[in-house]
Image: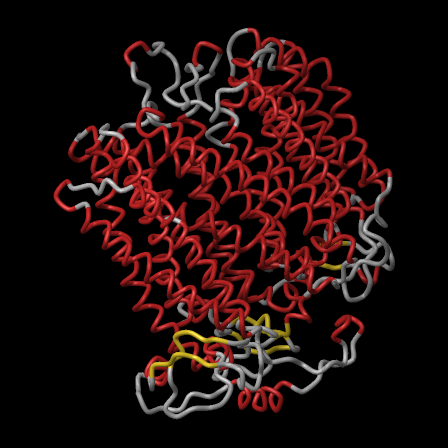
Amino acid sequence: MDVLDLARWQFGITTVYHFLMVPLTIGLAVLVAGMQTAWVRTGKQKYFAMTKFWGKLMMVNFAMGVVTGIVQEFQFGMSWSNYSKFVGDAFGAPLAMEGLVAFFVESTFLGLWIFGWDRLPKRVHLACAWAFSLATIGSAYFILAANSWMQHPVGVSLVDGKPRLNSIWALLTNNTALAAVPHTVAGCFAVGGAFLVGIAVWHLSRRKENTDVWRASLKLGGWVSMVAFAVLAITGDIQGKLMFQQQPMKMAASEALCHTEQPASFSVFAYGDVARPDCENVKSITVPALLSFLAHNDFSSEVKGVNDLVGEYQAKYGTNYPVDPALGELSGKPIDYVPNLPVTYWGFRLMIGLGALSTVAAAAVLWLTRKGRMPASKWFRWGALAGIAMPFLGNSAGWIFTEMGRQPFVVVPNPTGVDGVWMFTARGVSGLTVGEVLTSLILLTVTYGALAVLEFFLIRRYARAGVSGVLPPGSADKQSDALAFAY
Amino acid sequence: MDLAMVWFVIIVFFWLGYLFLEGFDFGVGILLPVLGRDETERRVMVNTIGPVWDGNEVWLIVAVGATFAAFPGWYATLLSSAFLPLLAVLLGLIGRGVAFEYRGKVDSVRWRRNWDRVIVAGSLLPALGVGLLLSWNVLGLPIDASGNRVGSPFAALQWETLLGALAIVGYSVVHGAVFIALKTVGEIRVRARTLALRIGPWALAPLLGLLLVVQLRSGSSWTWVSLLVVVAAAGLALMRLTGSHEGQAFALLAVTIVGAVVTLFGALYPNVLPSTVDPAFSLTITDTASNPYTLQVMTWVGGIGAPAVLVYQGWTYWVFRKRIGTTHIPPVHVP
C-alpha cells in the first residue's frame, strides 16, 4: 500500500468511528435538555431521574466524540496537506467557524452543566444544557457546510489555479448543505431514539422499578425515532435529486446502473457481483420507473448509466493522470471514474434498509407496549436492545456511500459551477513516508479499538444499573460541603 | 495593518490562550502522582480542572483551525512536516480526555491507577509535542520551494527543538503547581507551593534557554523587551510565591507566557514558517494568507466569537472560583 491508500484508510476509519459517537451525543444532548426542561417546568421526579440517567450515558459517550474530533481537525493538514493548500481559502472558513462558534460553546457549557448542578440557579443550569446541545447541532452545520463544499463547490472563483472564496453566504447556504444538515441531524435523532427505546424496554421487561421513568423514555424514544425517519426520508429524497444533478456518477453507482435507461427502474436487491462493469452477471429485483422518479420527479425521465458517464468524465477531466512523481503509483495511469460499485450499491441499500427497519421496529415497540402493556418474551427485550445498532450502522453506511461515491475526486467538479474547481483525491495527499502514515494508521486504529471496548463496557454498566446508578439512594446524609458532582 | 497581519496576531492570541490555559491542565496532569498522595487528593487535583479542561483544549483546535482558514499553506506545511510529533500530541490528548471522564466511573483501585497513568502520559506527551512543534515552527523546518519537507521525519530534530519540548513541559509543571496551590485548601496547597518553589528555577530554565536561542538567531531589537519581561515576570512569580501570594504568582506566570509567546512569534515575523534549506523558501505572512475576502469574513466571525469566548469562559472560572479540598470530595457512587 502507498501513502495515498494508507491515508485514505486512516481518514475512513477515524471518520466513521468519530461518527459513531457524534450522533449519540447530538441525539442525547437535545433529548436530555428536553427532559431537564420538563423537570424544571413540572418538578416531577421522573424527569429528574431521566435527565440524570440519560445525561450520564451522554457524558460517557461525549468524551469519546471530543477526543476523536481533535484528530479530524489535524488530519487535513497532516495527511492531506496538498488538499489543504488547494482548498484552504474556502474550506478552512467553515472549519474555523465550527471551532470558534460551536466547539467553545459546547465544551464550556458542558463543563458548566456537569459540574454546575449545585452552583447555578436551576434555570441558568438548564440554559447551559440548551447552549451545549444546540452548539452540537451548530457544529454539525458548519462541518456539513465544509463537506458539502467538497461535494458541490460553490461561492468561489478560480484564481491562479486555486478556488478563491467570493461568497461565504453561498458556501453556507449551499443547497447540498441545506439538504445534508437536516438529513444528518435526523440521523442523529434516529440513534438517540433507538438508544432510549432499547434500554428502556430492557429495564421494563426485567424489573418493576422506576417504571414511570422507563415508560416515559420509551415513548419519547419511539416517537423521536419515527419523526426522525420521516425527516430522513424527505430530506434523503431531496438530497438524492440534488445528487443526480451534481454527481450523476455517484447516483448511477448507487444503483450499479451500467447502461442509461429510460425510464430507469430502481434496483431493490441484486444477486451476483455488482462490481462487474458490464452488469451481465447481475440479476436484480427492480421496481420499474422508480429510479426515474427518484432522480427527476418524473417516471419517464432518462437516468444515465455508469458506462455512459465514464465517457463524459474522460472528455472533461482526462483519460490519464498526469505524469507526476507526486501522484505515486497513479502517475500516468488511466483514471478510474467509477466508484467502488459494491460499496456504493450496498451502502445505499443498507442505509435506507436499516433506517426503514428501525422505524418499523420503533412503531412495533410503541404498539406492543401501548397502554402499559409489556410483552414478556425474552426475544422482545433482546431485539429492542439489538435494534440500537441499526441507526448507527445506517449512518455509517450512508457516509461510506456518499464519500466513496465521489471517488476519484476529493473535491467533486460542480456541473454548474466554476470550471477547474475540483481535485483528484490522489492529488490531495501529503508527501509523507509510508512509515509515518502506517504508524499513525496502526496507532490510531489500536487506540480507537481499545477505547471502543472501554466505552461499550461503561455504557453497558451504567445502562444496566439504571436510575440507582446515577442517583445516590440516601442523598440526605451527604456531607454538607461536598460537591454535587466530582470526577 | 492589513488583515493578514491581524490574523497573524489573532493566531498568536489563540496560542497564548492555549499555552496559558492548557499549561496548567498539563501541569496538574503531570503532577498527579507527585502531589496527590492518596486517592482523595488526586481527586481534588483532577476536580480543580474538571469543569474547564475541555474548554481549554478548544484553544488548540481553534489556533490550528484559524491557521487553516487564514494561512492554509502554513497549516498544511507545518502539520504534514511535523507528522509524528503531532501524532504523539493527538494520542496523548485522546487518552487524557477520556481518562478524566472515565477514571471515576468504576470503583476499582486498578481501574483508577491505570487511568492515572494515562493522565500523566497524556499530559506529558502533548506538552512535549506542542513544545517541539512551536520551536520547530519558529526555528524553521527543512522545507523546499513547494512547502514539502525534505529528508526524514526527524530531519529537523536538533538540541534547540528538544529544549523547546522541555520548555513547555517545564512551564506547565510550574504553572500547574501554582494553579493547584491557588485552587485547593489544606496540605496539598502547601505541598504544591513548596514544589513550585523548589523546582521553579530549574523547570523554567529551558523556556528561557529556548527564548534566548530564538532571540539570538532571529530576534528583533524589540523582542529583547519581551524576553526581559519573561525573565522579570518568572522571577517575580517565584518571589511572590514565597510569600504565599498564589494569585499574584499565577498572574505573573500568565505574564511570563505572554512574554514568551510574543518573543517567539515576534522573532518569527514576517515569516510564518522559515525554511532551513533556503531562506527564499520560507513561508511568509503575505504568501500564505488567504484572500482578503476570506480574511474579512473570518475577522467578523473572530471579532464577535473570540470576545464572547472570553466572556463565557471567564464566567465559568467565576462560577467555579472556590478552592476545593479533601472535604469537598463526595463519596464514590458508581454502579
Residue B270 in view here: no
Residue A327: x and y in percent read 75, 72
User: Could you tell me which residue is drawn at 31 percent across and 43 percent down?
Assistant: A196
Position of residue B168 relative to residue B156, above or below, is: above
Q: Residue furthest left?
A: A371
Looking at the image, residue A78 sits to the left or right of residue A282; the answer is: right
User: Could you tell me which residue is drawn at 33 percent across and 39 percent down?
Assistant: A129
Residue A380: x and y in percent read 29, 45
Which colour assignment does the render follow?
A: secondary structure
Residue A140 in view here: yes
Looking at the image, residue B166 sits to the left or right of residue B114; the answer is: right
- Observer-nearest of A212 and B70: A212
- Observer-nearest of A434 and B285: A434
- Observer-nearest of B43 and A459: A459
Residue B123: x and y in percent read 64, 31
Looking at the image, residue A392 sits to the left or right of residue A82; the answer is: left
Looking at the image, residue B65 sits to the left or right of residue A269; the answer is: right
Position of residue B97 relative to residue B68, above or below, is: above
Q: Residue furthest top?
A: B187
Residue A337: x and y in percent read 60, 80
Toward which corner of the image does residue A273 lie, by quadrant?
bottom right
User: Could you tell me which residue is drawn at 50 percent across and 78 percent down?
Assistant: A253
User: Could you tell me which residue is drawn at 50 percent across and 69 percent down?
Assistant: A149
Q: How many marks?
A: 0
Screen quadrant of the N terminus of chain A = bottom right
Position of residue A482 relative to residue A282, above or below, is: above
